[in-house]
Image: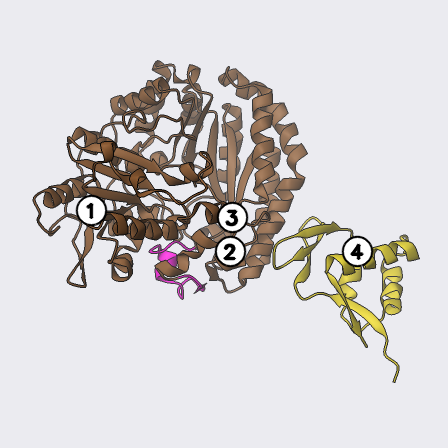
Amino acid sequence: MAEIVLIHPPTIFNPVLFRKKFLSAPLVHYGYGMLYLGSFLIKNGYKIKIINIPELYQWWGCRKELLPSIFSGSHGQTPILFGIELNWMHQSLGAIQLAKRLKKFFPEVFIVFGGVHASLFAKEILLEYSDYVDGVIKGESELSILDLLRKIESGKPPENVSGLVWAKNGKVIENPVTKILENIDEVPPYSPKKLGINKVFVTPAVNIMRGPCSMECIYCIGPRIPYIFGRQKIACHSINWIIEQISILIEEGYKRLFFQDYFWCIGKNNLLKIAQALQKEKINEKLDYFNITSAPGFLDEELLEEFSRAGVDNIDYGVESGSQKVLDTVRRKVTISQIRDSIKISVKKGIIPNTFWMVGFPEETVEDVMKTFQLLKETIELGGLPRWVTPLIVVPKTKLYEEPERYGIKLLFKSFRDYIAFSNTEHNPNAWYPNLITHETKYFKNYDILKMAFILRMLIKRSLNRILEKARENSKIYMKYHPNLTLSEIEKRITSSISVIQGSFW
Amino acid sequence: MKSTITLKLSEKWDILEDFDGNYYILNLENGDYYEIDSMKFKFLSLLDGKRTLEEIINIIAQNFPKNKISDKNLGDFLEEGLIKGFLKKCFI
């Protein structure tokens, strides 16, 4: 049986340097795209080995360079393909260094990159690194990789492989995306054990849907999915598939889960069906932690009630800014009153509302940051738990990146090489990274953006006691909906979250 | 001509006031910071390398009539600033 090795790379491919470099979530955390790809390939008759290099470095105490034998298949077999996950920008350098090393030891094996960041810079990666990167698959990779494997097995060049960017005689060829799974249930739910992941990893995510976000935020890749990755419309997994996925994870010992995609865009009826199916399965009795994400204003009182009864005990709200002018400028279709209401209703329905904030938006002034400061205080009084303050990072291929002049910003980061700074910047306990500010605005230079983020973080740090007081006030409601949740667990979550806020860049 | 030693804020440090009247002195190179009170904030904002300490103390006394600046407190603060590096000596 042909074997494929899928690898989650470190930020930097060196165990000693890795410990000193820029630390952020998710270092050890797998992108679930790779797990679903592995599951799909097993279904199609391939043997899969998954390697998590940060885990080897961090938790297994590896201090020396990894031996080539680590990357061999089972029984020392040479794999037919290495798939390297390049989902997040901070994996850039590690992914490239890993590919270089693999090519040295396994020159005949095809090395392909996949994931969001790789997709955004596919052509550039091939132009610069085709000596050791053989291809990048843009967007969803299941059908593409299956075609690619068949070409490799029959000794043919990867012509017409959907979405593959590759090099031929020094020229980069961009195959168009021609194949997208119609029925995404064809990808089986993943079983960490079947993928060879025996150690329970942080918090697994469950895929609910694929396709574009229904918002139009100019700084986010979500609305750009049709143009970059080829999927034009939202596709959802069936209820049975979702329940099967969650059941597998619970059976394998996972007690924490989250939904991290744009699942809140799939429409109220679909959401209600999911929540009710989870209730039927008594998922709330089997989990210690269940997190979902939503833009404020999308989940109404009825939905929050149903999801709370289904076991969801905390929700991430991307509040972003307290200035309506800023929200309108970046085309985030959320109002300040929706933000307040979402937090109030979440608390009322027993769900702890986590809030996420940003600074460095186009047109944002000190007065706008003051509004964010005031709203942050207000949300704390409503029961919100502020989790992160981050300088806005201009993500490649977003509207903001494509049209900086239109939005009055100056890009400081443009190329794949520029974004490598996210891999090799040394960790700073104050999250003070002037070299990682991706842009300047009409009103803020890079140091101004950092100072504004500092002011908001200090507000959160100073508010710890008040946040705890509010949580104690609301704890009866939380515990009524979630019998497994205790006051000490709620307090532990809050204190651990606030304690890292000072050093969290994103 | 006789020169006088005074102090100014080091270039790699800045002072910052938030929207609730909290004050900080912030290292722009590494993000280290110290929380300070409004009087120290005013004091640091007046340290431009041109005013003498005596001039600054007079301005502070006018701005904060209820808070007396003791020589010891001022001396400790200036010493702390020089050790931590947010103050530097200069000559006028």
Q: Which mark is residue A360?
A: 2
* Circle 3: residue type: Lys
* Circle 4: residue type: Glu
Q: Secondary structure at mark 1?
A: loop
Chain colored brown? A
Please state which of the two labelled residues, at mark 4 or mark 3, is closer to the viewer: 3
Q: Indicate whether residue A174 is drawn in magenta.
A: no
Chain to which mark 2 belongs: A
Q: Which mark is residue B80?
A: 4
Q: Residues within 10 Å of mark 2 (few under 14, many from 20)?
A: many
Chain to which mark 1 belongs: A
Chain colored yellow? B
> Could one spot residue A184 in this view of the protein?
no
Q: Which mark is residue A20?
A: 3
Magenta-highlighted residues: A394-413
Magenta region, mostly helix, strand or loop?
loop
| C-alpha separation, residue under disc 4 versus residue under disc 3 | 30 Å
Please state which of the two labelled residues, at mark 3 or mark 2, is closer to the viewer: 3
Q: Indicate whether residue A409 is drawn in magenta.
A: yes
